[in-house]
Image (cartoon, helix red, strand yellow):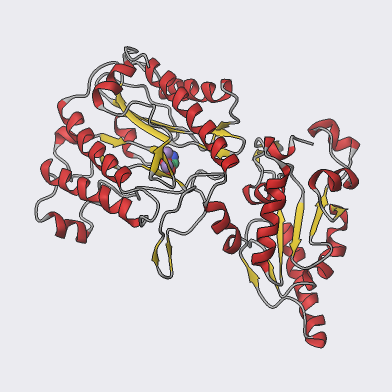
Amino acid sequence: MTRPFLGFSPERFSERRTRVKKALGGGVLLLPSAPVLRRSRDTEVRYRPDSELFYLTGCVDPGVVAVLRADHEEGFVLFVPGRDPKAEVWSGPRMDPSEAKDLYGADKVFSTSELEERLPELLRSGSRVLFRLGVHPALEKLVVEALTWARGRGSRTGDGPRAVADPGTILDELRMVKDSEEISRIRGATELTVAAFEEAMGATRPGMGEWEVESLLEAAFRKGGGTGPAFPTIVGSGENGCTLHYTLNRSRIQQGHLVLLDGGAEVDLYAGDVTRTYPAGGQFTGPQAEVYHWVLRAHRAACEAIGPGAQVSRIHEAALAELVMGLVELGILQGDPGELLEEGAYKPHFPHQTSHWLGLDVHDVGDYATESGPRVLSAGTVLTVEPGLYFPSGSGTAPSALAGIGIRIEDDILVTSEGAENLTEGLPVSPDRVEALNRRELRE
Ligand code: GLY
Ligand code: MN
Ligand code: MN
C-alpha cells in the first residue's frame, strides 16, 4: 500500500467523481491502474501510477480497477488486489477490500479475482462503456467478452451498452483546468526544476560528460523531494542539441559547444518542463548568440500572446513570426516572410510546436482545437512555451558557421484571470545572465 491521495484532500477526488458522473449520463467508466512495466527480464520499472485513475480516486497502487456510474447506488465500485502475504514480502503491504472501501469512499469494493465474474453485469448497466482500448490487453479481453454477453442480453431486453468510447472524451476537459491544489503541486515541480537547473547549469564545464549534467539535475530533483524526472532528461551538447528528444547523454561536452538541457521534476505526479541552452564554461560565440537572439525573441513574443480568452494557436503564430524573420536575417531563408510562413519553409529548423499543456502528464491532455476552432485559453490552464532553432550539420541548409547549433528555450506558464504567470521565470534566460549563471557569478 503506497501513500494514497499524495497529500491532496480526499474531497477533491469525490468532487471530481461527481462532475464525471454528471458528464457520463448513462455510461459506465472503467479505469484501471497503469500496467506494471518490465525493463529487462523480470526486473520492473519503478511504478508510475495512472494519471486518470489518480485524478478520480487518489489511488496510486497497481492492480486496481475503478468503475463509475451515474444514478446508481453503487456508483463508485473498486476492484483491488487484496492481501497476498507472499507478494507483500516483495512489494509491500496491501489493503483488503474493506480497508480500501473506507479509505477511498467507494460504494462497493471487490477483490480483482472477482472482476471476470462481475464485469458483465457492471457493463450491462450502462448505455455505453468508457474504456481505453489498446493499453490493457488482459482487461480488454474481459471487457470484450462482457460486452459481447451484454449485447446478447440487450437484444432481448433493449438495454445494455451500444458503444465504447475513450475516457478522455470526458476527463480531458476536466483535467485541462487545474484547481488550487494542483497548481500548488505544479509550482512545487517548477520551483524544484528551476533550483535543479541552477545547480546543473552552474556546474557544467567543458570536458564533462553529458551524463554528469544529467546526474546533477536528477540528483537535485530527488534531493528536493521530487519523485525524479517527469520525462527522460535531455542533455544535448553541440550537434546533439539538434536531436529533439536526444536522451543518450553520452558525449563529452566540448569547449565552445552549447549545451541544450531539457528536464523537469515530478512532484506528487505533477510535472515541470524547462529548457535552457548555454555555453559550457564560456561565452556564446557570435553565431550562437545570433541564433539565441531570435529564439529568445520568439519566446518573448509567444509568452506575450498568453492570457485568458487568447487563442492557443496565436502562441505558435507569434513565435513563428519571429523565427521566420530570424531565419531571413540569418541568411537561411530568402523571400517574403509572409509567404515563407505560409509555405512552412521554417520547418527544417523549427519542426515542433511552440506549446503543450502541462500537468499530471508532461504532455498533458486536452485538444488544442475544437470543432469551433482553436482552443481559447482559460484561467487555471498551464502550458509550456518552447520555441527553438536547429541547424544540424549535414542537412545542407545552413551556412557552416551555424552548423551544429541547436537552441531551445522553454518555460512553464500558468494562465491566470488577469493574464499569465511564468512559473519558471526565476531561471535566467537573457544571454548575459545565462553565461553568468554558468560561471556561478549570479547570486539571486
Ligand atoms: N522534453 C519534452 C518537451 O519539452 O516537450
Ligand atoms: Mn522540455
Ligand atoms: Mn515541453
Residue 114 image position (x, y, % from top left): 88, 57
Where is residue 153 drawn, in percent x and y?
A: 82, 81
| Rendering quarter of residue 255 | top left
Task: Please determine whether, in this image, residue 160 is positioned above or below residue 103.
Answer: below
* Quarter of image, res 405: top left
Quadrant containing ligand 1: top left
401 or 300, which is in the foreground? 300
Relative side of 310 to 225, left or right: left
| Residue at the (45%, 35%) spot, across then down | 247
Rendering quarter of residue 180:
top right
Relative vertical location of residue 176 with respect to residue 424 in this rendering, above or below: below
List x then y, in percent, for residue 326. Answer: 16, 43
Tell me which residue sits at (47%, 23%) in the image: 196
Q: In which quarter of the image is the N terminus?
A: top right
Side of 388 where 345 appears, left or right:
left
Asked whether the viewer can see residue 374, the reply is yes
Closer to the camera in the image, 413 or 3? 413
**Residue at far front of view:** 418
Q: Nearer the viewer, residue 404 or 166?
A: 166
Does residue 307 appear left or right of residue 392 in this picture? right
Residue drawn at x 46%, y 25% is 214
Residue furthest to the bottom: 156
Number of labelled discs? 0
Residue 245 visible somewhere in the drawing: no
